């Protein structure tokens, strides 16, 4: 897998997190609180600036009430 492909996976993940959060009409701060993360971390994820751990991905999917497969599509 090339670096460009890796980056695209991260960008797609970030976009799906933001789209789902906005569809639920919740703020980054609210999502962060539900997931047990910091608001600035959510912002960084949505801008594809951070690579989340598996545990963080699970926290986010639970907070967004979706399956991991809805966020990570390869």
Image (spheres, rainbow, N blue to C red):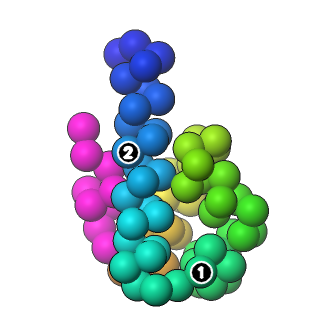
Q: Quadrant of the C terminus?
A: top left
Q: Residue at x 68, y 79 (%)?
A: 29
Judge left or right: residue 67 versus residue 17. Answer: left
Tally the marks.
2
**Secondary structure of residue under mark 2:** helix
Percent coordinates x, y for residue 68 in the rendering: 33, 60
Percent coordinates x, y for residue 11 in the rendering: 45, 41
Q: Is residue 72 magenta?
A: yes
Up the image or down, 2 lies above or below 65; here it is above
Which residue in the protein does label 1 denote?
27
Which residue in the protein does label 2 denote?
12
Neighbor class of circle 2 (other Cα within 10 Å; few <14, some 14-19, many 20+) is: some
Q: Quadrant of the N terminus?
A: top left
Q: Is residue 36 magenta?
A: no
Q: Residue at x 44, y 62 (%)?
A: 17
Query: Which range is magenta?
Result: 66-74
Up the image or down, 51 lies above or below 60; here it is above
């Amino acid at each position: 897998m090339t670096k460009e492909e890796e980056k695209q996976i991260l960008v797609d993940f970030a976009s799906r997190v933001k789209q789902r959060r906005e569809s639920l009409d919740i703020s980054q701060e609210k999502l962060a609180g539900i997931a047990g993360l910091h608001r600035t971390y959510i912002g960084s994820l949505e801008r594809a600036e951070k690579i989340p751990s598996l545990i963080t991905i699970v926290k986010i999917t639970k907070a967004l009430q979706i399956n991991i497969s809805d966020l990570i599509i390869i």
